[in-house]
């Protein structure tokens, strides 16, 4: 977030992760991606 703020970026909308079989235990703090409603 600090990197984004340094470059003048700010959140516009948020999405939610949803799982059918419970939390898979992924290291979410180390996973970065672009998420949009158009992908899903």
Image (tube, helix red, strand yellow):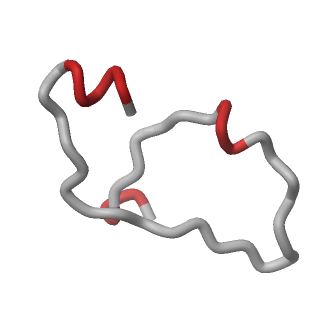
Vertical placement of residue 3 versus 16, above or below: above
Say left or right for 26 vs 40.
Answer: right
Residue at the (87%, 53%) spot, across then down: 25
Vertical placement of residue 35 versus 6, above or below: below
Rendered location of residue 36, percent (x, y):
34, 56
Rendered location of residue 39, percent (x, y):
40, 57
Residue at the (67%, 31%) spot, across then down: 30
Say left or right for 10 vs 36.
Answer: left
Q: Quadrant of residue 24?
A: bottom right
Residue at the (59%, 66%) spot, across then down: 17
Closer to us: 26 or 6: 6
The quadrant of the image that shows the N terminus is: top left
Say left or right for 36 vs 20.
Answer: left
Rendered location of residue 2, percent (x, y):
36, 26
Say left or right for 32 vs 14.
Answer: right
Closer to us: 1 or 21: 1
Closer to us: 17 or 4: 4
Instruction: Name the residue furthest left.
Output: 8
């Amino acid at each position: 977030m600090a990197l984004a703020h340094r470059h003048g970026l700010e959140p516009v909308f948020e999405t939610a992760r949803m799982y059918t079989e419970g939390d898979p235990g992924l290291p979410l703090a180390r996973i970065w991606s672009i998420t949009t409603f158009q992908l899903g």
